[in-house]
């Protein structure tokens, strides 16, 4: 089964306003809430909830938009978070990186890492900071 985007799930366009997304979510919720449907389409309900959790948050939505955009790029490798190297950014934080075939590297932002850890997204596509290669990272 092909993955539907969060926008397709809520039936809004990518350029929908936060208000339009909120309204679409509420409408969907009324149709699919497990308490209200006899056919118990729980999976659909979970998808709607997951889509809403990302799209309601402006930061998460932007990050998600980027990953959608990058999906069209050529993915040269599929890796897992555990394949990545933890690099000290400053005294307090680390960043996950992965070496590219070129001299560049792929960097997983903290926000993207959190999205993966929380299960809100199954994978994230990131691009090399030096060339146009992309990799797909999953948990
Ligand atoms: Zn590269």
Image (spheres, rainbow, N blue to C red):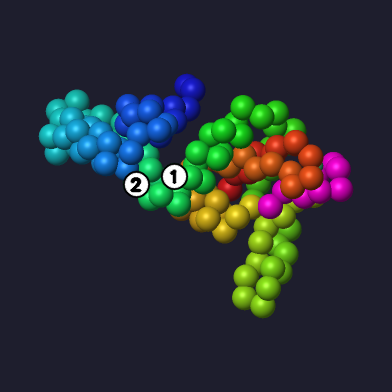
Q: Residue at x 55, y 40 (%)?
A: 66
Left or right of 58, for residue 42: left
Q: Which residues are magenta?
A: 100-107
What separation in Å lies between label 2 and label 1 (alpha carbons)? Answer: 7 Å
Residue topped by disc 2:
56
Image location (x, y in percent) of residue 126: 65, 43
The answer to if 102 sits in the magenta stretch is: yes
Report if residue 51 is visible in the image.
Answer: yes
Element on which disc 1 rests: helix
Element on which disc 2 rests: loop
Q: Which mark is residue 32?
A: none
Image location (x, y in percent) of residue 112: 55, 51
- Circle 1 packing at 10 Å, graded few (<14), some (14-19), many (20+), is some
Q: Which mark is residue 61?
A: 1
Q: In terms of depth relative to the viewer, which is nearer, 7 or 33? A: 7
The answer to if 26 sits in the magenta stretch is: no
Q: Residue at x 47, y 22 (%)?
A: 1
Label 2–label 1 contact, CB within 8 A: yes
Q: Residue furthest top?
A: 1
User: Based on the displayed image, in which of its 4 quarters is residue 131 positioned?
Assistant: top right
Q: In terms of depth relative to the viewer, which is nearer, 125 or 35? A: 125
The image quadrant in which ligand 1 is located: top right
Majority secondary structure of magenta residues: loop
């Amino acid at each position: 089964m092909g993955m539907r985007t969060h926008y397709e799930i809520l039936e809004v366009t990518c350029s929908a306003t936060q208000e339009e997304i909120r309204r679409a979510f509420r409408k969907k919720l009324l149709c699919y809430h497990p308490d209200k449907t006899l056919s118990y389409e729980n999976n659909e309900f979970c998808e709607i909830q997951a889509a809403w959790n990302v799209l309601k948050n402006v930061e998460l939505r932007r990050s998600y938009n980027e990953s959608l955009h990058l999906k069209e790029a050529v993915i040269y490798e599929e890796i897992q978070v555990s394949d990545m190297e933890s690099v000290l950014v400053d005294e307090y934080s680390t960043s996950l990186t992965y070496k590219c075939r070129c001299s560049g590297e792929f960097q997983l932002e903290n926000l993207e890492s959190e999205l993966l850890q929380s299960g809100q997204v199954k994978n994230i596509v990131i691009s090399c900071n030096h060339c146009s290669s992309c990799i797909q990272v999953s948990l």
